[in-house]
């Protein structure tokens, strides 16, 4: 029998030994620090956090880039005979009435001779080489990878230029030989009127500015037919077109308010993004049949430069306001009392003050000088904006310093401003907004009661109240706050 069995029979109970709890100073310090950290974390998430913003000079460039449709006086010319068309005039070239534009090869023999002939090396003149350089440079400056389809227009333009040079040499040979056989199969087609030659049509040749609608700008359904040299054409097919007037226009969709502003100005400077060329366009606001608003920009020059373009990206160069740049979230409205300038006097420390009527214990009246901060001055009305209800109350009676005239405080007005935090509390400062978009505003600099560059303002005006103390906790833009006592 074991000893444990014997003890159990005797009724003895075995109790587990518990070690005493040893509390030392290290555990107390650790517990206190842990509790403090927890309290700080809870207070951090429960307290409001103010982000400051440093005022700097800047400007706002509005989104002034628009895609418009170019409209010209265009006349489409159709063929009077069937055959292979070979162009003689270069696209973008001005031709006079009865100038040769293209030839019709009814049998195809001339086309075979052109195909078999070779220009060889060093056969292009400096003028002819300049044509290629001009087309290549214009394409390089206006190329946009998002609009790769323009590469095909460039390809066709170069091809037509090459064929035009080949045709010119072939015509010179025909004239020198005087072949009657060739003369019988070739029709010389001249221009019916003066104009700029273009070898493409798209159905918008008769479109007017008033006829522009939102559907016109749907380039997914837009079809541009490029005329290619040395191709077979039937009688009545469109072979080229003439732009007969140097006056032309671009129509862009625009917001009604902005369009009205530009129309009121009369003219606006336009930059063509394809080649960075700039010109002044006359503005006219259009309210077309689809209920949308459009702006017509009319030009009297440079039409020939863009004769191969229907849709164009342009930038409207308007005056950009420059001043102090602040976020819209900092802007707040505050109400003030209006005090006539005649009742403003100088206080003991040279600050702005008023003489307010007060009552003595015996019931008599007297005046007291009260210093106050002025937030704005309206020269036209001759009134000062002073803080409402912080020093004065509605119904207070003010006295002139040199007469018995009185003024009862009652008139109120609001100012637009921001909360300056340079002095450690939310100090309202008036701002004069010059220009504003959805995110920022440009305000006038160097005003008497306004902001200065490098001032710190509250980023979110809704996060503070008037005269609220602001304590910085670190050197970042995040601060904690406390109420002014």
Image (cartoon, rainbow, N blue to C red):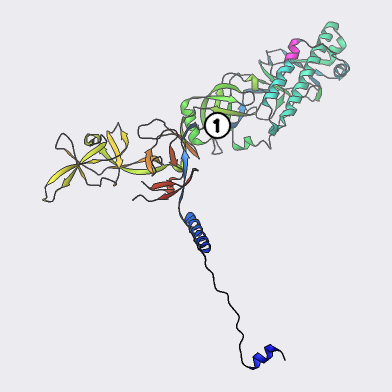
129 shown above or below 443: above
Direction front: furthest residue = 3
As rendered, which of 215 and 259 lies closer to the eye?
Answer: 259
Tell me residue 62's x, y (percent).
53, 33
Q: Give left or right: position of 65 versus 386.
A: right
As rendered, which of 400 and 297 lies closer to the eye?
Answer: 400
Question: Dot 1 lies on which element?
Answer: loop
Tell me residue 371's x, y (percent).
25, 40
18 shown above or below 366: below
Q: Quadrant of residue 92?
A: top right
Q: Give left or right: position of 56 versus 219.
A: left
Tell me residue 84's x, y (percent).
82, 21
Residue at horizontal 69 percent and vertical 37 percent from the top: 221
Q: Give left or right: position of 196 versus 43.
A: right
224 shown above or below 304: below
321 shown above or below 189: below
As rendered, which of 265 and 429 lies closer to the eye?
Answer: 429
Q: Is residue 79 visible?
A: no
Q: Quadrant of residue 274?
A: top right
Tell me residue 334's x, y (percent).
36, 44
| Overall secondary structure of the magenta section | helix
Quadrant of the frame with the N terminus: bottom right
Residue at horizontal 83 percent and vertical 6 percent from the top: 176
The verdict on residue 243 being magenta is no
The verdict on residue 129 being magenta is yes
Which portion, as a residue range, is magenta? 126-130
Q: Is residue 212 visible?
A: yes
Q: How many marks?
A: 1
**Residue assigned mark 1:** 64
Callout 1 crowding tier (Cα within 10 Å): few <14, some 14–19, many ≥20: few
Direction bottom: furthest residue = 9
């Amino acid at each position: 029998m074991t000893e444990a069995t014997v003890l159990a029979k005797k009724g003895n109970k075995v109790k587990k030994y518990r070690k005493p709890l040893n509390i030392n100073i290290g555990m107390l310090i650790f517990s206190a620090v842990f509790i403090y950290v927890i309290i700080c974390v809870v207070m951090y998430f429960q307290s409001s956090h103010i982000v400051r913003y440093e005022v700097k000079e800047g400007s706002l460039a509005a989104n002034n880039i628009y895609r418009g449709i170019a409209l010209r006086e265009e006349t489409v010319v159709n063929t009077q005979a069937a055959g292979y068309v070979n162009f003689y005039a270069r696209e973008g070239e001005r031709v006079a009435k009865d100038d040769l534009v293209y030839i019709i090869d009814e049998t195809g023999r001339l086309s075979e001779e052109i195909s078999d002939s070779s220009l060889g090396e060093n056969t292009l003149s400096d003028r002819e080489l300049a044509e290629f350089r001009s087309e290549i440079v214009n394409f390089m400056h206006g190329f946009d990878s998002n609009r790769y389809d323009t590469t095909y227009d460039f390809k066709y333009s170069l091809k037509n230029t090459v064929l035009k040079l080949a045709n010119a040499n072939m015509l010179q040979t025909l004239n020198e030989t005087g072949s009657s056989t060739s003369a019988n199969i070739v029709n010389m087609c001249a221009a019916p009127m003066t104009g700029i030659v273009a070898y493409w049509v798209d159905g918008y040749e008769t479109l007017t500015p008033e006829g522009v609608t939102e559907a016109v700008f749907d380039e997914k359904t837009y079809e541009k037919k490029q005329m290619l040299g040395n191709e077979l054409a039937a009688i009545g097919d469109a072979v080229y077109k003439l732009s007969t007037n140097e006056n032309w226009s671009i129509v862009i969709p625009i917001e009604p308010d902005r369009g009205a502003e530009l129309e009121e100005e009369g003219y606006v400077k336009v930059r063509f993004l394809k080649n960075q060329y700039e010109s002044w366009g006359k503005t006219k606001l259009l309210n077309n049949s689809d209920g949308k608003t459009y702006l017509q920009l009319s030009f009297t020059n440079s039409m020939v430069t863009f004769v191969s373009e229907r849709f164009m990206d342009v930038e409207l160069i308007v005056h950009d306001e420059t001043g102090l740049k602040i976020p819209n979230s900092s802007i707040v409205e505050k109400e003030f009392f209006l005090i006539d300038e005649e009742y403003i006097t100088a206080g003991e420390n040279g600050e702005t003050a008023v003489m307010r009527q007060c009552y003595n214990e015996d019931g008599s009246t007297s005046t007291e000088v009260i210093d106050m901060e002025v937030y704005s001055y309206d020269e036209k009305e001759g009134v000062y904006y002073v803080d409402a209800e912080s020093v004065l109350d509605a119904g207070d009676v003010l006295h002139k310093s040199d007469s018995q005239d009185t003024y009862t405080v009652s008139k109120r007005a609001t100012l637009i401003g921001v909360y300056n935090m340079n002095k450690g509390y939310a100090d309202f400062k008036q701002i004069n907004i010059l220009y504003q978009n959805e995110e920022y505003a440009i305000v006038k600099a160097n005003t008497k009661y306004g902001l200065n560059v490098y001032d710190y303002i509250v980023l979110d005006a809704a996060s503070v109240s008037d005269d609220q103390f602001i304590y910085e906790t670190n050197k970042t833009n995040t601060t904690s706050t406390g109420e002014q006592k």
